[in-house]
Image (cartoon, rainbow, N blue to C red):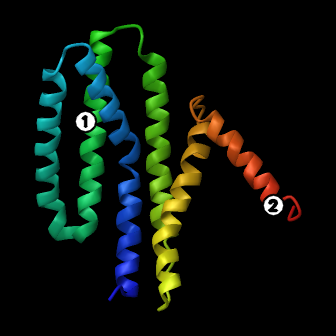
Amino acid sequence: AFTVAHAEVTARVLACYGMALLPLAGTFLLTRVFFALNDTLTPAIVKVIATALNIAALTLLLPKVGIVAVPICFSGMYFINYAALLFAFARQNPGTTFSLLREVFIACVAAIAASVAGYSAAPAAASSLVSRLITVCVPIGVIAVLYPLLAHSLGSKATEPIVSRLRVFFAAKFKNHF
């Protein structure tokens, strides 16, 4: 049976996986960019190194922090992978990457902050199934709303369409409450 403890662990694990969303997507995109540039070796080398570091970190962290170590190390692996691919791309294409690197840095900071907030927002669950589902879903909701808002407040232009839709949504939802 899915107990209160299971719900809390699941919420924390999902919140930790939330950190990996941006670097995972970025890694997939940049890998295809390298493939399009006929460079398959760079992404392969980066992935092997990141995977080796992931295994080493997981070996060290798993006994100390338990199952939460898996998404933490997974996220870390993709941050390393993404950063290394960005660095390699910047070296191969000088002068074209400052704004890209700035956007990526902002997005990474926002992703980490939103995941930490989601991790912290997982409420203590009661014994009902609904409250367990809420415990699992709250971190995801916090990350989904907080990430674009944080990235936008840090100066990201890429999140403007999402933020403008969130503004409209929340203005309509809470117009009588303020």
Is 74 situated above or below 159? below
The numbered dot on residue 62 is none
Asked if labels 1 and 2 touch by Cβ distance under 8 angstroms, the answer is: no
Q: Position of residue 90 (x, y in %)?
A: 32, 16
The numbered dot on residue 81 is 1
Is 37 situated above or below 75? above
Instruction: Inspect the image, locate mark 1, and give the three-letter code of the amino acid beneath it.
Output: Asn
The residue that label 2 is drawn on is 174
Is 89 situated above or below 8? above
Mark 2–mark 1 Cα distance, whole angstroms, equals: 41 Å
Task: Examine the image and state in which quarter residue 59 appears.
Answer: bottom left
In the image, 128: left or right of 73?
right
Q: Dot 1 lies on which element?
A: helix
| x 35%, y 74%: residue | 9
Q: Dot 2 lies on which element?
A: loop
Task: Examine the image and state in which quarter residue 150 appears.
Answer: top right
| x 24%, y 62%: residue | 69
N-terminal label among 2 and 1:
1
Q: Position of residue 129 (x, y in %)?
A: 47, 86
Which quadrant is the N terminus positioned in?
bottom left
